[in-house]
Structures are given as structure tokens and as C-alpha cells.
Image (cartoon, rainbow, N blue to C red):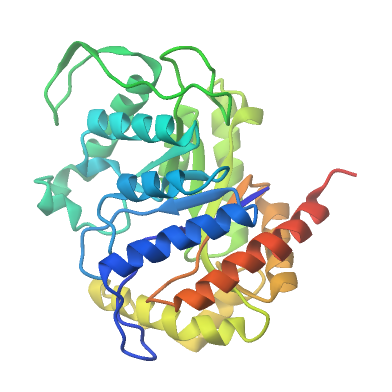
């Protein structure tokens, strides 16, 4: 199983100190994390897209390109690309370029996003929420399969034998075919875990990644099983399809749960206020930090044990952690990344190694 990290470039003031990191400094922090993650053998470095003042990154691809230039092996990708408010043609061109720059390490995770600020910003109507995504994901996948595309839809100008360039590297990583122009970019479908979104990813025959930010591992295991069942019904080779999980978490020698809690509480309190949810508490945090919850905090042995348990239920191929909610200090994040790569990863690999 692969392990990795992802970030939105959080620059909300630290709830403990009140200090706010500048966007420029956070960009430097992100690149430092990418270098370390690569050095300690982690598999994935993801950057998310947001268009609001508490996050530094609205355009992940330039950050990922900089990370690719400073690393050797780690895969670099979005977490996620808000495809509903993007032009799939430009998205594909940008990630194909990133793939060429990185030597075939680029991945694109397409989703609708957990926030809606990009819709009014780019002139998309929330009333078209489902239709926008369905049209654009279909076009994105057609662009990946065909170099010359003829297409028409509702939300962008038609394409008439349009040649979409550049093409990705076609290096034989992941699910790539290596055939010129056909299915060369590693594309994942992101979902919060609904039967409808699970079924869509399965029907499309693309890798899926679940945002385990609420609920339990047991409930998401049901979605993973549904995904594999529906993919098989659609005629896809389930053995080639991957399941990923994204969640929050922190690895520390001591007091990981206590170190992470104030930042989790601050972040979730703001989101709850925006969306009318009940205010989070230490009780709800402890429930999520327990064995079947979606927060992965603890020492290396504890986090490894929980990751292995999650794998036993979901049989997932990748797990990525967001460690920097509400500006967890850079030093703490770096220590967590190092422990994830040097101690957690070997423990997980040993437990999951075939006998």
C-alpha cells in the first residue's frame, strides 16, 4: 500500500499562537515538505485547489511543477481539481505538461470539491452542480483517450477535430497503456462517499479516492466493495483499478492527539459555522481518532496499526494524510512526514506483505 501526504496550503492563523503564515512562506513550506516526503520514501504529494483567504493555493499545477523539479520519485498530483468550474481542455493540457516535466509522475484527481466558492467566481451555476461535473468528467476522459477530439456539450464551446496537446509522457506507471494518445494520464475520481459517486467512478473505470473525513472505516468499506462490484458489472478489470483514502492525521513520538486537536477543532468549527453543522467537540474528535474513525493520530506504531486495520476493511491501495489543518507548525508537520516515511511505512509494508 502506498502512503502520501496532501495539503491545501492552509494559512489560517494558528489557533494557539495567533500567528499567520504568509502565502509566500507557505509555498516554501509546501516544497520543503515535498522534498522530505520524497527523501523518506513516501509515494504521493498532493495539493488541493481553493479560492478563499484561508488557503494559499488556488492553482495547484505550478506548485506541483515546482515540487516535481525538486524531487525524484514521488508522484505529484491534485487533491482535488475542482473540475466542475474548470475547462477540461486546459486542465488536461496543464497536467500533461506537468507529466512531461516530472518524468511521468503526474496524477489528476478530479472532483467537485468540498467548498463552493469557485462556482460564482468562474460563473458556474450551483443549479447545474451535477450536470456540470458529469459533462466535464466525460470530456476529460475523452481527451485522455483521443488526441483529436470532436465533441459538443452545454458548458463549453464545441470541439471539431481539435488536437489536444501536449500529450502525457506515456511512461508505464499506474494504469497507463503506453499507447500514443490513449489513456496516458493517471486520473482518479474523488468522492466523499455516496453510492451515486461511487457508481459513477466504477462505471467510468477510473481509480477512486474516498475522503474519509467523517463516518467510519466500516461504512467506507461498503462503498469500496460497491465500487468493485459495479466496476466488474461494467466490464472493467477490477484488478487494475485502485482505491485510495484521504484523511487527516498526525504522527508524533508523544501526544500526537493533543497536538493535533486544537488545529482540528479550529478548522472544523469554522466549517461547521459556515454550513450550519453542530460544533465539534473533544468527544467527537476522540471518536474519530479511535480505531474505526477517520483521524489518524498517534505514534508510529499506533498510526501503522490503524492504517493496517483500514486496509483490512477496504483493501485500499493508497492512503494520504492531511497534517496541516489550521496551520499546524511546519516543524511538527515535517516531523510527522519523516515518521510516516521512516517508521510507519515500513511497519505497514511488513504487516501487509504476502506470506
- Farthest residue in the right direction? 355
Give coordinates of residue 345: x percent, y percent.
70, 58
Relative to 57, 342 lies left or right? right
Quarter placement of the C terminus: top right
* x then y, percent, for residue 277: 32, 75
Against 62, is 148 above or below?
A: above
Residue drawn at (27%, 18%), measured in percent from left and top? 164
Q: Name the residue: 49% across, 83% down.
A: 261
Apparent side of residue 345 relative to residue 97 in the rendered image (left or right): right
Q: Quadrant of residue 152?
A: top left
Q: In this view, does 89 lie above or below 84?
A: above
The quarter of the picture where residue 334 lies is bottom right
- Please say whether residue 43 is visible from this viewpoint: yes
| Lateral position of residue 86 relative to residue 344, left or right | left
Question: Foreground: 189 or 338?
Answer: 338
* Residue 9 seen anywhere in this rendered image of the structure: no
Instruction: Identify the residue at image location x=43%, y=58%.
Output: 31
The residue lying at 51 percent from left, 72 percent from top is 333
**Residue 105, image x, y percentages:** 50, 36
223 or 97, which is in the foreground? 97
Q: Which of 278 and 239 is in front in this view?
A: 239
Up the image or down, 271 lies above or below 131; here it is below
Residue furthest to the bottom in view is 17
Residue 181: give x, y in percent of width and height.
Answer: 41, 14
Amino acid at each position: 500500500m502506498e502512503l502520501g501526504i496532501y495539503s491545501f496550503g492552509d494559512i489560517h492563523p494558528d489557533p494557539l499562537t495567533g500567528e499567520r503564515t504568509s502565502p509566500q512562506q507557505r509555498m516554501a513550506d509546501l516544497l520543503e515538505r515535498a522534498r522530505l516526503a520524497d527523501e523518506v520514501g513516501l509515494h504521493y504529494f498532493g495539493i488541493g485547489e481553493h479560492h478563499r483567504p484561508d488557503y494559499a493555493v488556488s492553482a495547484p499545477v505550478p506548485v506541483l511543477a515546482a515540487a516535481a523539479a525538486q524531487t525524484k520519485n514521488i508522484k505529484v498530483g491534485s487533491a482535488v481539481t475542482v473540475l466542475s468550474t474548470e475547462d477540461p481542455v486546459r486542465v488536461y493540457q496543464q497536467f500533461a505538461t506537468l507529466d512531461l516535466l516530472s518524468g511521468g509522475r503526474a496524477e489528476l484527481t478530479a472532483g467537485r470539491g468540498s467548498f463552493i466558492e469557485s462556482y460564482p467566481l468562474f460563473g458556474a451555476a450551483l443549479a447545474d452542480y451535477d450536470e456540470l461535473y458529469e459533462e466535464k468528467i466525460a470530456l476529460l476522459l475523452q481527451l485522455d483517450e483521443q488526441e483529436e477530439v470532436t465533441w459538443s456539450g452545454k458548458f463549453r464551446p464545441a470541439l471539431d477535430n481539435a488536437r489536444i496537446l501536449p500529450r502525457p509522457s506515456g511512461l508505464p506507471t499506474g494504469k497507463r497503456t503506453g499507447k500514443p494518445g490513449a489513456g496516458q494520464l493517471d486520473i482518479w475520481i474523488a468522492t466523499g462517499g455516496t453510492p451515486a459517486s461511487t457508481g459513477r467512478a466504477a462505471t467510468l473505470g477510473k481509480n477512486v479516492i474516498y475522503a474519509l473525513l467523517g463516518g467510519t472505516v466500516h461504512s467506507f468499506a461498503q462503498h469500496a466493495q460497491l465500487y468493485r462490484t459495479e466496476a466488474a458489472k461494467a466490464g472493467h478489470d477490477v484488478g487494475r483499478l485502485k482505491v485510495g483514502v484521504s484523511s487527516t492525521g498526525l504522527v508524533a513520538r508523544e501526544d500526537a492527539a493533543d497536538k493535533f486537536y486544537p488545529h482540528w477543532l479550529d478548522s472544523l468549527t469554522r466549517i461547521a459555522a459556515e454550513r450550519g453543522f453542530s460544533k465539534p467537540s473533544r468527544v467527537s474528535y476522540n471518536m474519530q481518532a479511535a480505531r474505526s474513525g477517520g483521524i489518524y493520530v498517534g505514534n508510529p506504531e499506533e498510526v501503522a496499526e490503524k492504517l493496517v486495520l483500514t486496509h483490512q476493511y477496504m483493501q485500499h491501495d493508497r492512503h494520504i494524510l492531511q497534517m496541516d489543518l489550521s496551520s499546524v507548525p511546519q516543524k511538527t508537520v515535517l516531523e510527522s512526514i519523516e515518521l510516516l516515511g521512516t517508521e510507519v511505512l515500513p511497519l505497514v509494508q511488513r504487516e501487509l506483505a504476502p506470506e
